[in-house]
Amino acid sequence: MPAGPAPAFEQYLELNRERRLESYKALLRIPSVSALPEHASDCRAAAEAIAADLRAIGIEHVEVAETGGHPVVYGDWLHAPGAPTVIVYGHYDVQPVDPLELWESPPFEPIVVGDRLQARGAADDKGQVHLHLRATEALLATSGGLPVNVKFVVEGEEESGSVNLDRWLEANRERLAADLVVISDTGFFDGNRPAITIGLRGLAAVQVNVYGSTIDLHSGSYGGTVQNPANALCAIVARLKGPDGRILVPGFYDDVLPLTEADRAAFAALPFDEEAFRGSIGVPALVGEAGYTTLERRGARPTLDVNGVWGGFQGEGSKTIIPAHAHAKITCRLVPAQDPDRITELLVSYISEIAPPGVRVEIVPQHGGRPSLTPIDHPATKAAARAIEATFGVAPLYIREGGSIPVCASFESILGLPVVLLGFTPPDDHAHAPNESMDLRNYETGIRTVAHLWYELADLPR
Ligand code: BES
Ligand code: ZN
């Protein structure tokens, strides 16, 4: 196999630049928000659009497979005998768009702003799925084949915890036989420096419902005689973390792998501008667990955050009531070797124990996900580093990210496969937030990186 794609590959990409952008935009116009039931048919439409795209470029055995939730798109190209088989995983679902009023353009009407394409999903993760399809398209069109065997797995429930995917992986073990997984659902480091992600955090989530009276009470007639559910909820939340940023749930840190000297040195060596990071998010100061740096806190330490809290009167002015109920959504980001089920159990028992008297406290576990650390010295990771260097012109940084991709640990545990996290989004992509965007230069060069990686992998001893 040659060391990289033939010149015709680049010519094809140059000729098709506009068509490519139009096809990218078309995918972004489908409002495939997995968390909202009213968008279920849009999720299916996005799956069908990806399946149609795969078929059109020459991928075989394309199927929109049922999972019990939003479908998974599968397709493969297996005509490189003797070469490795790569699973390319991505997700077509996106996060909800609220607060809508903060978008400068409608979230499902993609527009080019400078060097960026702006829309929900432009970066996370439709843009990165799309760039893989375009690399495959250009290789198949210009060399009649791929240097490796490829199996695409594009799911529709990543943003809501991939709750049906493990079962689907288990049921499709044989069909998913491979040598490694490549996931493009991460991004570059601050300053848009090319990076390979080697660590992701896991997740444990609960909703806390605090119930008092059957209906709201007059706070004059009843105030002082009953427990207020909103006060009770705040009292609970106040006891979850100490002033030093440590989580107070007993046993929470039991399984956390401590940072080694080498881990700390790796974090310290990253070209991180803390003040720029602070400024970019608009906070007056950075705050976190005592004894750790900002990058360590984000990449290698667990967290507990209230994601939403509600109950009682929300309108203008005041209303003198004791609300009948109050609620909070809480998530913990987890690090190796914490287990989401264990952490959820600890949360449930601690919150039950500290619940004030006079209210009924219900703790409802939500979806979770395991953390993962991918091997930095795996030949496939090194191949990805060479592909980045060949196309972006610089060697990648190796980073541990704070976000989660639950299926990452599942590929390792269910299918026994190493995972390479090769993502291309800029750090200021506003993923999950208003005005999400993808840097089109990262997207374009990313297409070339993927093609290079397939050639690099073809040459690896198996
Ligand atoms: N693409 C992100 C994961 C990510 C975030 C990687 C930040 C690197 C940096 C992914 O789509 C995502 O947002 N995942 C969710 C998973 C959760 C719903 C289980 C997350 O991290 O919140
Ligand atoms: Zn994503």
Image (tube, rainbow, N blue to C red):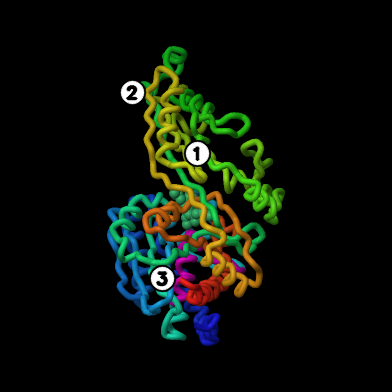
Q: Residues within 10 Å of mark 1 (few under 14, many from 20)?
A: some
Name the residue carrying label 1: 255
Please tell me in which quadrant of the rendered image residue 377 appears.
bottom right
Amino acid carrying label 3: it is: Thr
Q: For the magenta stretch, what is the residue range?
A: 115-136
Task: Tell which of 251 and 366 is nearer to you.
Answer: 251
Query: Which quarter of the rendered picture does the C terminus lie within?
Result: bottom left
Residue 366: percent from left, percent from top: 39, 41
Residue 225: percent from left, percent from top: 43, 12
Task: Tell which of 319 and 326 is nearer to you.
Answer: 326
Residue 24: percent from left, percent from top: 46, 70
Residue 98 visible within the image: no
Name the residue carrying label 2: 214
Q: Is residue 453 above or below residue 428?
A: below
Q: Residues within 10 Å of mark 2 (few under 14, many from 20)?
A: few
Could you tell me which residue is drawn at 62 percent across and 37 percent down? 289
Which mark, by number, is residue 85?
3
Q: Is residue 97 above or below residue 140?
A: above
Q: CA distance from mark 1 to mark 2?
A: 41 Å
Amino acid carrying label 1: it is: Asp
| Mark 1 or mark 2, whichever is nearer to me | 1
Amino acid carrying label 2: it is: Thr
| Mark 3 or mark 2, whichever is nearer to me | 3
